């Protein structure tokens, strides 16, 4: 029996929370309030599928109202249940706090396998779900703002935004009711790849930190590090791509139907082309295909990136994990029991609540763009370019030397939306990394990064409650 059958997901999150909470000085009542899930909505609604009525089960959990709106993805999966949604909502609360995003945590789920439905049927389900949320005041720019998660993407977010706008035509900020929208429909450039990019920034920071390198006996930098990635979806694909661009060697990619392995490195872009053409990573010419994908989690590597789904490293396989660093792309891929085993083996874990926060950071930027009704960079880009050109002309006049047209373009370019989003994300990930590390380095009772991240989150949430005057 695996530990996850014994410890439900929300309980597993709460155990990790409890370990950190015990190291803080906050009052027990406040720590309880931070831990519990503030509101859960369970819905069952009818949708016509192939002429028949199908009853769809769905949830939305708002874990913490200490800041509003609440924020979190919507998952389409036949494995969704209330416990999972509550656990994921809790992780969102801590994640937002860790990366200074002023939202409470939430999560939604619809219990369907999206592969079993046509786009028209998925649209009907998504729009009906949105109406159910609206009727119960569980969605809105100032209330609760969903985003994509497993099985959903920009298309579903566009349906949600459109449905909400139809019913709220006089609400000027209606577009901010959901993030992760296509750029043409109020989305922000850089959102799609944000979680994978943020993961890359976090791993890069750790692999440049002497404290970590000494602990793990690793050399500095990403270049040459052997990485295994589980899940080749939004997070896994982008994480692998950014790591590879910086010189990492991706030795294996694991999917639900098998894995591909090449110890000299897998070309991630070519693998994506193959997967799009065939519907699977299996049979990729640049690697060996394995039937038992999950077994490759136990292969030798420097960095293991579980980026598929929760509870992949459990008491059953934790002892066999050989990676030095586990970079959690997915939410909850390591169970609380497995974590103890891994830490005892000297393996370091960069936890979900920090490492996959890139999505919510850029979602926050998208929400800001929607409520301010202006694209980032619109006011300053041209001014910045003109200033740069003036400085270049002066330097050329003073030195008597001149740059060629390409060099001039590179120097003069003002920051556009994507530049600002990516640099805001980079800054956020670096700042949060060092805040968490500071707790780990200065508090002798805090021995691991996840506990330090929880302490960081708890301190910030406690501060918000104090500001509300609830826990003076
Ligand atoms: P996705 O649906 O785009 O990709 C998930 C991938 O995992 C798919 O390719 C799927 O085939 C694969 N997969 C499913 N079951 C598997 C299994 N048993 N073994 C190996 N692979 C399997 O989803 P995503 O958005 O990339 O999300 C992945 C994880 O990251 C989830 O835990 C999600 O909560 C978390 N996450 C996502 C975001 C985001 O911005 N998308 C942000 C934070 C956290």
Image: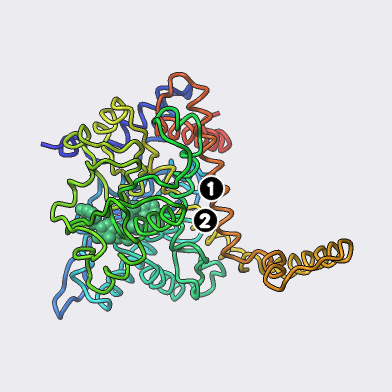
Q: Quadrant of residue 1?
A: top left
Side (left or right) of 326 relative to 293: right
Q: Indicate the secondary structure of the residue bearing disc 2.
A: helix
In the drawing, what numbered circle is on residue 446?
Answer: none
Residue at the far left: name it: 1
Question: Does any portion of residue 413 appear in the rendered image?
Answer: yes
Residue at the far right: name it: 398
Q: Quadrant of residue 326?
A: top left
User: Where residue 338 sits in the image (x, y, percent)?
Assistant: 25, 33
Q: Estimate the spatial distance between the alpha carbons at disc 1 and disc 2, rounded to whole Å.
A: 8 Å
Quick one: label 1, few (<14), some, or many (20+) residues within 10 Å? Answer: some
Q: Nearer the viewer, residue 204 or 139?
A: 204
Residue at numbered disc 1:
102
Ligand 1 quadrant in view:
bottom left
User: Where residue 41 sits in the image (x, y, percent)?
Assistant: 31, 53
Q: Nearer the viewer, residue 17 or 35?
A: 17
Q: Residue at x 52, y 30 (%)?
A: 471
Residue at the far top: name it: 444
Quick one: label 2, few (<14), some, or many (20+) residues within 10 Å? Answer: many
In the drawing, what numbered circle is on residue 364?
Answer: 2
């Amino acid at each position: 029996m695996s530990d996850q059958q014994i410890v439900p997901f929300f309980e597993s999150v709460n155990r990790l929370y409890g370990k950190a909470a015990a190291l803080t000085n906050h009052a027990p009542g406040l720590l309880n309030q931070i831990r519990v899930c503030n509101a859960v909505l369970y819905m069952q609604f009818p949708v016509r599928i192939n002429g028949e009525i199908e009853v769809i089960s769905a949830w939305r959990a708002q874990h913490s109202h200490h800041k509003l709106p609440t924020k979190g993805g919507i998952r389409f999966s036949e494995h969704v249940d209330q416990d999972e949604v509550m656990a994921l909502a809790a992780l969102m609360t801590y994640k937002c706090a860790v990366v200074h995003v002023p939202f409470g945590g939430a999560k939604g789920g619809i219990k369907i396998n999206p592969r079993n439905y046509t786009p028209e049927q998925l649209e009907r389900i998504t729009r009906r779900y949105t109406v159910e949320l609206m009727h119960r005041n569980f969605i809105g720019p100032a209330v609760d703002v969903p985003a994509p998660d497993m099985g959903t993407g920009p298309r579903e977010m566009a349906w949600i935004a459109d449905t909400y706008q139809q019913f709220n035509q006089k609400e000027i900020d209606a577009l901010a009711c959901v993030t992760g929208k296509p750029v043409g429909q109020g989305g922000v450039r850089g959102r799609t790849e944000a979680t994978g990019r943020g993961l890359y920034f976090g791993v890069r920071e750790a692999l440049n930190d002497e404290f970590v390198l000494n602990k793990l006996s690793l050399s500095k930098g990403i270049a040459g590090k052997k990485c295994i990635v589980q899940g080749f979806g939004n997070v896994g694909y982008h994480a692998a791509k950014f790591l590879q661009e910086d010189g990492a060697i991706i030795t294996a990619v694991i999917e639900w139907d098998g894995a591909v392995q090449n110890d000299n490195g897998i070309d991630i872009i070519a693998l994506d082309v193959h997967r799009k053409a065939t519907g699977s990573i299996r049979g990729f010419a640049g690697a060996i295909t394995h039937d038992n994908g999950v077994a490759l989690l136990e292969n030798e590597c420097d960095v293991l990136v579980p980026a598929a789904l929760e509870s992949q490293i459990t008491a059953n396989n934790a002892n066999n994990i050989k990676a030095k660093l586990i970079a959690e792309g997915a939410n909850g891929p390591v169970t609380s029991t497995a974590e103890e085993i891994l830490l005892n083996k000297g393996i370091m874990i960069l936890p979900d609540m920090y490492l996959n926060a890139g999505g919510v950071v850029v979602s926050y930027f998208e929400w800001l763009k929607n409520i301010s009704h202006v694209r980032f960079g619109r006011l300053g880009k041209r001014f910045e370019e003109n200033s740069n050109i003036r400085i270049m002309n002066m330097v050329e006049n003073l030195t008597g030397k001149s740059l060629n047209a390409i060099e001039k373009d590179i120097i003069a370019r003002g920051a556009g939306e994507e530049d600002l989003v990516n640099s805001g994300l980079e800054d956020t990930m670096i700042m949060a990394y060092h805040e968490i590390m500071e707790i780990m380095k200065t508090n002798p009772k805090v021995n691991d990064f996840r506990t330090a991240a929880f302490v960081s989150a708890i301190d910030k949430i406690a501060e918000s409650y104090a500001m509300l005057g609830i826990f003076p």
